[in-house]
Amino acid sequence: MKVEQLMTRNVGTCIPDDSLAEAARVMWDQDCGCAPVVSGHGDGQSTLVGMITDRDVCMAAYTQGQPLSAVKVKSAMTKSLCTCRPTDTVAVALGVMRTNQLHRLPVVDADEHLVGILSLADVGREASHCGHKMGEVSGMAVGETLEAIVQPRPPRREMVAI
């Protein structure tokens, strides 16, 4: 099964100069916990430049001591990205999620234009509907990925509240 068969195509996004309040609004409107950060080129294509999660928003508000409207997305977004392609198998995407402890993967084309997002929940829903018919992706693979994702990891940096 390919990523393009399960990914969400119409993804809410923000840009680096948006405020965290705008990023939070996008996540609220889309009922999701992250928003890809894109840089448009005026050609209708959006190049992925980062990801922002609801946790990033909360931690930035806490550590910077500013209202969400005063903090830019670029100060809190993750710039080091893991992605997949629409033509990748779901098993490959799950491997990236496991290795990098990610719940979601942005899906990009060969030019790094955002085309969708694949979440572990997307894969889990499909596995629960299809059972063993999914071939390379089973409920067991989803469970193993979730187990890897939730393992404690070392702190990324020291946090100091203002």
Image (cartoon, rainbow, N blue to C red):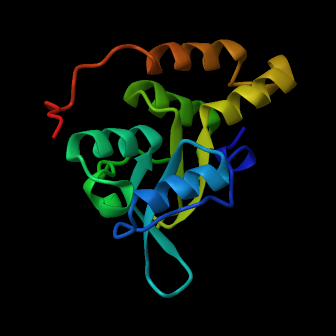
At 68% from the left edge and 58% from the top edge, which residue is drawn? 9
Looking at the rendered structure, the number of numbered marks drawn on it comes to 0
User: Can you give x and y, in whole percent of width and height, for residue 161 in the image?
Assistant: 18, 35
Quadrant that contains the C terminus? top left
Residue 138, position as x, y percentages in the image: 71, 18
In the displayed structure, 49 sits above or below 64; it is below
Quarter of the picture holding the N terminus? top right
Q: Is residue 130 left or right of residue 14?
A: right
Residue 74 or 64: which is nearer the viewer?
64
Residue 62 sits in which quadrant?
Answer: top left
122 to 14, vertically: above or below = above
**Vertically, is 153 above or below 22?**
above
Pick the residue in front: 71 or 67. 67
- Can you tell which quarter of the image residue 69 is in? bottom left
Q: Is residue 43 left or right of residue 81?
A: right
The spot of residue 133 in percent (x, y) is 84, 23
- For image coordinates 29% across by 19% down, the residue present is 153
Q: In the shown orientation, is residue 43 left or right of residue 18?
A: right
**What residue lies at 71% left-to-right and 16% top-to-bottom?**
139
Q: Is residue 82 visible?
A: yes
Residue at the (37%, 55%) spot, across then down: 68
Residue 87 visible in the shown view: no
Left or right for 79, reference 131: left
